[in-house]
Image (cartoon, rainbow, N blue to C red):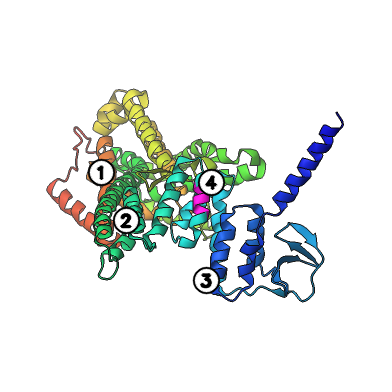
Amino acid sequence: MQLLPKLLVLACLLLSSLAQAAIPSDLLKPLTGDDPDARVAAVARIAALATPEAAKVLQALQDDALYAAPDGKVYIVDGGQAIDPASGRNVPLPDGIDGVMVNNRLRAAVAGALSGLQLLAPQRATRLAAAQALQKAVDPAQLPLIRTALARESDAEIQQLLQVLIASANLHAPDAATRKAAVQALAGSSDARLLPVLQAMLEQGGEPDEAVQLAAIETLRQIKGRVARMELAGNVFYGISLGSVLLLAALGLAITFGLMGIINMAHGELLMTGAYTTYLCQLFFRAYLPGMQDAYLLAALPAAFLTAGLVGVALERTVIRWLYGRPLETLLATSGISLILMQLVRTIFGAQNVEVANPAWMSGGVTVLGGLVLPYNRLAIIGFAVVVVVAVWLILNKTRLGLFVRAVTQNRRMADCVGVATGKVDMLTFGLGSGIAGLGGVALSQLGNVGPDLGQSYIVDSFMVVVLGGVGQLAGTVIAALGLGEVNKFLEPVAGAVLAKIAILIFIIIFIQRRPQGLFAMKGRSVE
């Protein structure tokens, strides 16, 4: 019975010695030679081993820590110690060793091999990022490593990327049958970077074999069609996303301007107030609740609504209540308030923009149609806009406040005669519109930096949405915001961002000339 433990120990020792001899000497020796092609090929063959020892040798080569002895053996030198990569053992520092010379070509091959070894990382995200990075420029010398990674890969998405990488590398294979198979394998890809490569094969002198050319023509057609559909879907999505942002920015204005007739030029600063409230919530959670930092956005929503709403109520009680029925005076007064609020923010927070980071659950995106990435933050804003619109509709149509708002809007005198506190309704309505603007500021903080001039970027667009949709019409505001977002996104690639804005403005001017009431007319509006 005592023989069995001894045999087990002996077997473990033998396996350990075999595992240490991970890199054969014939793979290491070309690194010390003068043939540049052989040295690059040796790097690719070592990387294809896909072992920690191979990564250690390549890292040493990149760090100029790989040395060669006069007899041609290779050593990794770390301080005063030497490691024999063929055995994995520490050995005395040999006499006469000299550093392995690394030129730019070899250094690039080593860097590519090290990045390719990340295809074998245990973390899926690391492997996916490595495969996506190799798509930018894949070297045929990395084919053995990519094939090794494909054989070990279990994730379907990464497998597909690796197959595309292998096919891309084989486009320049010497064998025509291999090139044809590679071209056909790429037919299911949605990567627009393949288009110029395939197009070059069809140019004069690019591809000598006619069968490969025909396959390239068909693959080119399929990829172009898929890319065009992906771009169309991307424009539709980003148009809806932009429309949702415009809707959140304009919804509060649709109440204060559409229902109350107040030309509030400080509406953009109410958006800014909501954005800075979000920033303060982020700072609070970082300082006092670091374990719940990703929940700051949930706390920012009610905080921004209340803060912007209270600012709106204060403006209505101190300034605007005296200017009802005098739209030009409200325009001048709120323009001055806008400047005051911007300067106040500059005084408190400084003139520089501040960063509001997305929570972890809003970072990243989902990939659809093979290559179109839909960011989580924009998907969240679209959903948030839907929730806010539904909530506003319910308030205006299913609550007592909404009934009073509609009554005061249609006939202020009659509402006052039957006992409606019109002054209180005005205050609450303006506060509601301001609070909704604060919610819009929360959404805007998730798309970019927050600064004192944030509101100025959206005030003109907000008025365009409200006027185009029809004064006082919630449905018209929704349709106008989404329509302007889509038109803008489809015009930008053709005419550029500036010309697209000008074209939209000209369209709105012509439209209002033909239909002053906007898309939807409001019936029974009080003239006072």
Region of the chain picked out in magenta, as a range: 145-150
Q: Where does residue 412 sit, x and y in percent of width and height?
A: 27, 32
**What kind of residue is marked 4?**
Ala
Majority SS type along the magenta span: helix
Q: Secondary structure at mark 2?
A: helix
Q: Where does residue 329 sit, x and y in percent of width and height?
A: 32, 51
Q: Which residue is mark 3?
A: 37
Q: CA distance from mark 3 to mark 1?
A: 63 Å
Q: Secondary structure at mark 1?
A: helix
Q: CA distance from mark 4 to mark 2?
A: 32 Å
**Residue nearest the viewer, comparing 335 with 115:** 115
**What kind of residue is marked 3?**
Asp
Do callouts 4 and 2 mark residues in contact (Cβ within 8 Å)? no
**Disc 2 crowd, CA 10 A, few/some/many (<14, 14-19, 20+):** many
Name the image quarter holding residue 248.
top left
**Residue nearest the viewer, comparing 409 with 193:** 193
Q: Secondary structure at mark 3?
A: helix
**What kind of residue is marked 1?**
Ala
Q: Which residue is mark 1?
A: 480
Q: Which residue is mark 2?
A: 180
Q: CA distance from mark 4 to mark 1?
A: 40 Å
Q: Which residue is mark 4?
A: 125
Instruction: Give the vertical position of 81 relative to 371 (above or below).
Output: below
**Disc 4 crowd, CA 10 A, few/some/many (<14, 14-19, 20+):** few
- 147 is within the stretch colored magenta: yes
**What kind of residue is marked 2?**
Lys
Camera-near label (1 vs 2) is 2
